[in-house]
Image (cartoon, rainbow, N blue to C red):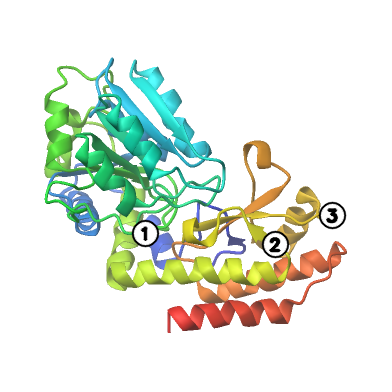
Amino acid sequence: MRNKEMLLIPGPTPVVDSIYDSLALETRSHTDPRFAAIYKGAIEKTRQMLKTDGEVFVIAGSGTVAMEMALVNTVASGEKILVISHGYFGDRFIQLGEAFGIEVDVLQSEWGKRVNPDDVEKKLANGKFKAVTITHADTSTGVAADLDALVPIIKKHGALVILDGVCATAAMEEDMSKTYGHPNYKIDVVLTGSQKAIGVPPGLAIVAFNKTALAAREQIERVPAYYCDIHNWIPIMNDPGKYFATPPVNLIYAYDEGMKLVLNEGMENRYKRHKAFGKAVRAALVVYGLKALAEEDAAAPTLSCILYPEGINDAAFRASLAKKGVIVAGALSHLAGKAFRIGHMGNTTEQMLEKAIVRIGETMNELGYLVDTAKAVECFKEVVYSRVV
């Protein structure tokens, strides 16, 4: 990669040369048949990745736009949703729902832990909810939702499953054809962005609806949106030569290349790689006295929120690490200054992560917290090789 720094934050993530090269291709008209063919291919690759029987939307926008599109097209004003929140980004569905007159109830876990499925069962049994939102991997806490436990409960009570895959898609299983104990128990909506595990620069909102979710849109006479109304986008997704709003032409080139890389690696291989990387990074950092916020059985394969031991200054740590070419993110909310967040997803390689482990150890030594970098690297390699090679 020709990146000058290792961008190991929870997104954006490192971009490989072939994606950069695609981004730099000649800009063509958004109605040019040559561009339309690439756009169509990118949409079809997304459908292949998520395996939906409905519609896929790839449009200009952030993950927040994708959240809005998912919600306003399935839940009408006055209807109820249940938000299952494992952190800051799960909580965003609260404000989003309220902005559109949706009645919001919420189950919030302690940061670093999962919501108890029994609490979800009780909540759904006591109220009629149109949909339930789940953040697959919360970017603030590094907690991964247990879909095998949650989806059957939600579907049993007749609600739609809206899955926020912004920090999970292309790294954690989000198979919309998968059944969870019953033929009709499936994920109804998956939303994501381009800049995390897919490994493309920011700027695309990606949403997939199954047929059940599309039927929910038909039940809503008028949605409180224009740009995010899927009725305006379905004709374009079926024939990208048509016009509704100008797509980001060069970013679509890059996304198509990114999706080629995803599918060529193979989804099962990607799931295994990300799981191994996450476990290996956390295991290596334990050698340094650094502990992940999330327990291992709830930890996300894509990023980790790492708590500092006593004596480590957050700003000094991250600044020193950045001088060595390794960029990590600060923690959010009440954990600001008490933890850092490291991404290990997308185009990130084993070599990059091993180097980051060394640089983190060097930085801690410089700050007076003496650690054994060789032992941490050995631990990292042991976990990676035992699960990937």
Q: Is label 2 or label 1 in front?
A: 2
Q: Which mark is residue 311?
A: 3
Q: CA distance from mark 1 to mark 3?
A: 35 Å
Is 372 situated above or below 170?
below
Mark 3: few, some, or many residues within 10 Å (few <14, many ≥20)?
few
Classify mark 3: helix, strand or loop: loop
Mark 2: few, some, or many residues within 10 Å (few <14, many ≥20)?
some
Where is residue 341? Give x, y as percent. 61, 53
Q: Nearer the viewer, residue 333 or 236?
A: 333
* Residue at screen point 20% across, 48% down: 186
Mark 1: amino acid: Met
Mark 1 or 3, nearer chain start = 1
Q: Nearer the viewer, residue 241 or 343?
A: 343
Which of the 4 quarters of the picture holds residue 169?
bottom left
Residue 12 in sight here: yes
Is 59 situated above or below 180?
above
Where is residue 150? Give x, y as percent. 32, 46
Residue 240 in sight here: no
The answer to whether the residues at label 2 and label 1 have Cβ atoms under 8 Å apart is no
* Residue at screen point 23% across, 20% down: 223
Residue at which label 1 appears? 172
Q: CA distance from mark 2 to mark 1?
A: 25 Å
| Quadrant of the drawing holding the C terminus | bottom left
Where is residue 240? Give x, y as percent. 17, 43
Mark 3: amino acid: Gly
Residue at which label 2 appears? 290
Mark 2 or 1, nearer chain start = 1
